[in-house]
Image: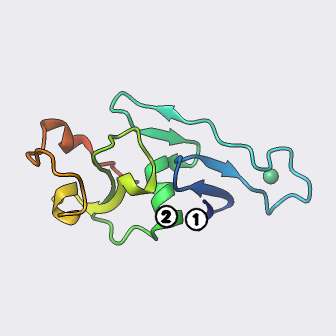
């Protein structure tokens, strides 16, 4: 479902695909209406677009604003490249996915792999 991104009134985020699109409220006729923004994946697997990190944009649109300055947009078991809202959460740098999703995820080895430490996105 597309929902507006509060900080970016001309844009919406989709909670299933993690896509960001332009939905223009500025121009009466806009050539970019409903056009999805290009996304670039960095070496750690995170996607960003011209508005910033996609994970943070999806969380802002579908969950709410970043709770505190200590919170980052974190990814869950589906990996850093998956920006479906079910794979995202605002979390503090000391938390990991399993601390806040206990019992709701498939029973797999809960020993955090070393790469889980990179599932945190610096913000600002
Ligand atoms: Zn426009």
Looking at the rendered image, the quarter that the C terminus falls into is bottom left
Say which residue appears at 91% left-offset and 59% top-offset. Answer: 28
- The tag earlier along the polypeptide, 1 or 2, is 1
Which residue occupies the extreme right position in the image? Answer: 29
Q: How many marks?
A: 2
* Residue 38 or residue 107, whichever sits in front: 107
Q: Which residue is mark 1?
A: 7
Say which residue appears at 39% left-offset and 56% top-offset. Answer: 86
Q: Is residue 46 left or right of residue 32?
A: left
Disc 1 is placed on an element classified as loop
Disc 2 is placed on an element classified as helix
Say which residue appears at 15% left-offset and 46% top-offset. Answer: 108
> Taking the image as drawn, is residue 96 in sight?
no
Q: CA distance from mark 1 to mark 2?
A: 8 Å
Which residue occupies the extreme front position in the image? Answer: 107
**What number is the disc on residue 60?**
2
Q: Is residue 110 left or right of residue 24?
A: left
Question: Residue 62, image x and y in percent?
Answer: 50, 65
Question: Residue 114, image x and y in percent?
Answer: 13, 37
> Taking the image as drawn, is residue 73 in sight?
yes
**What number is the disc on residue 88?**
none
């Amino acid at each position: 479902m597309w929902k507006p991104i509060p900080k970016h009134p001309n844009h919406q985020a989709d909670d299933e695909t993690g896509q960001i699109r332009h939905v223009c409220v500025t121009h009466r006729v806009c050539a970019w209406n409903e056009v999805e923004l290009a996304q670039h994946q960095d070496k750690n697997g995170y996607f960003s677009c011209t508005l910033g990190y996609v994970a943070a944009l999806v969380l802002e649109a579908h969950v709410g604003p970043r709770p505190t300055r200590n919170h980052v947009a974190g990814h869950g078991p589906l990996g850093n490249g998956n920006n479906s809202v079910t794979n995202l959460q605002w979390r503090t740098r000391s938390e990991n996915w399993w601390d806040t999703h206990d019992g709701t995820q498939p029973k797999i080895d809960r020993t955090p792999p070393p790469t889980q430490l990179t599932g945190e996105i610096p913000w600002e």
